[in-house]
Image: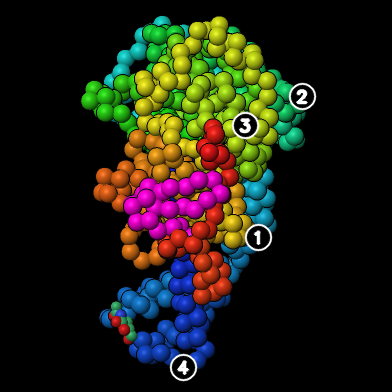
Amino acid sequence: MILGRNLPKVLCIGLILITAVNILLVFYTKGTIQTLILGALHKDLPLHLAEWDGTVIKRLSHLEVDFQHLKDDMKLAMKQQENVNNTLKQAVEAMASDTRHRFHKKLFPNSQLFKQWGEGLSEAQQKMAQELFQKFGYNVYLSNQLPLNRTIPDTRDSRCLQKIYPSQLPSLSVILIFMNEALSVIQRAIISIINRTPSQVLKEIILVDDCSSNGELQAPLNEKIKFYNQKYPGLLKIVRHTERKGLAQSRNTGWEAATADVVAILDAHIEVNIGWAEPILARIQEDRTVIVSPVFDKIHFDTFELKKYGLSADGFNWELWCRYDSLPQSWIDQQDATAPLKSPSIMGILAANRLFLGEIGVLDGGMLVYGGENVELSLRVWQCGGKIEVLPCSRIAHLERHHKPYALDLSIALKRNALRVAEIWMDEYKHMVYLAWNVPLENSGIDFGDISSRKALREKLKCKTFDWYLKNVYPLLKPISSIVGYGRMRNALDESICLDQGAVPGNTPIMYYCHTFSPQNVYYHQTGEFYVGALIAEKNTEDRCLTDPGKGENPTLEPCSKAASNGLNIYWDFKLGGAVINRATKRCLEIKKGTSGTYVLVLQTCTAQMWKIQYVIRNWGTN
Ligand SMILES: *[C@@H]1O[C@H](CO)[C@@H](O)[C@H](O)[C@H]1NC(C)=O
Ligand SMILES: *[C@@H]1O[C@H](CO)[C@@H](O)[C@H](O)[C@H]1NC(C)=O
Ligand SMILES: [Mn+2]
């Protein structure tokens, strides 16, 4: 499960906004050019057109009939012309491209599929491509045309090519799990595995179908399997779920069917790269307790082109969303680009000694749909005596979907799974997951299922504590124990509006209509700080604190520890249902009617306004 590289959500939203503005600008510019040129042809010629001789202009009017022909003529004319005016040249290009589009009208100008791809497709082809894209979340139309055995760039560091691996390596079962994947994508995965894995180690490829409804994954897939097995007897197996069981249980099904020394449990929308298996098998042969992850490259959902990703550790935040973390200094200091990289977590795809993975409990079958099962495995591996490493010389290209058709809102499943992980593995730090998701600690109303057997497993394996994990494996996460109230902050004058972090980028908090997204998360600390916005609680990134700048009537948000060391006014007195008073300036956080008649957030002499915060920890606020 890969969800973007190292982009905090805030940054993501910012980028989306910037992109949106850029798109608008692009359209605006193109529109303007078109208006200019078409206008120029129909009305009086502007100055720079008048400089051209009549022939060229006559030719211009023919553009719509046969633009390619004319473009050549234009080029000739331009060569003949001494002082070619660049502005006009560009305008002509724009018009030529406009004409091309008129031959094949863009039917879905707003579809992400056609932003970088699809030039020259007929309307029927566009319709088909768009329909497949909606259904699968990637460009199946293109996938169906690309060779199943296509080559992809070798993205390994050159030093990987010098590595020598033992001639005797453990045998390998590759497990591909899928649910309504495109057949051509699955076939490309299979063929990449057959072509790029030493045949003496590749024992089997096990397909796990999590109850796909797609017709082409029934008989047609069976036919393909038969076909491959004629060429490679017994290589392919398929296990089909008769009901949908989700990611974790599909991986378990694959593990149960596997028989080789090592299992590699992969998604079916991948293409393994040259030499991917040897580093994995050699490392697991060396140490049976290591769970390994390859390095991922990205296959673009629209063009199917490969983008090389740099090496990074696999991590997660307090919501348990996975993400990429920067390389630890200790790894950099080794100065060996091929050295295994100790990693707090896996992204989802993994390889392991089959028996060891069984001993520690494979995957938690109680994790539903998608998300969090990778963090659950990771905590279990580390806390129960194993380790996780990313192997720089093993690379797998992974198709990053534009959207996941089976779960339009992934956060619902992840939230539920995250609470389950917290309850089983995170001991006295589990509140951090509840806080990050803005869920009450008691009676959350979220059913994370029966955890007794997983707790018994933890007991049986004599696993270490989450405290040990934080200190020894993932010190980047910074648990906080001083938070006493959290959730939405509402003023009694109008409870339909909530304290909100305001525009990003920007540091001016506002009052805004209450919603359920993290920009309205607020965390009040016993020590007096108010964090506003999504909870971060990490060593290298600061949460933002509500601040009285001391002058003017607008509060600000400042990076907390920097603000503290600069002596800014970030400490507030607050009791549930009472005023919010800055300890240094004695001003109150209040709301007042602005010029437009709506309430705005201000700092002013206290008028005894009352605030409430959604959830309370311990007995805070009652005394
Ligand atoms: C093209 O013509 C316009 C209008 O006469 C002029 O403003 C512009 O500088 C010219 N561009 C070039 C590159 O000569
Ligand atoms: C792919 O398969 C075709 C047909 O078997 C073959 O001609 C071609 O050389 C193969 N390409 C690669 C890159 O292996
Ligand atoms: Mn995937």
Residue 44 x %, y %: 46, 93
- Say whether marks 4 and 2 touch (CB < 8 Å): no
Residue 260 x %, y %: 55, 9
- Say whether marks 2 and 1 touch (CB < 8 Å): no
> Callout 2, which amino acid?
Thr
> Callout 3, which amino acid?
Glu
- Neighbor class of circle 2 (other Cα within 10 Å; few <14, some 14-19, many 20+) is few
- Neighbor class of circle 4 (other Cα within 10 Å; few <14, some 14-19, many 20+) is few
Any mark on residue 242, and which?
Answer: 2
- Give the foreground label among 3 and 4: 3
> Callout 4, which amino acid?
Asp
- Give the foreground label among 4 and 2: 2
Q: CA distance from mark 1 to mark 3?
A: 55 Å
Question: Which portion, as a residue range, is magenta?
Answer: 569-590
Q: CA distance from mark 4 to mark 2?
A: 71 Å
Any mark on residue 44, and which?
Answer: 4
Name the residue beneath numbered marker 1.
123
- Mark 4 CB near ligand 1 (8 Å cut): no
Q: CA distance from mark 2 to mark 1?
A: 38 Å
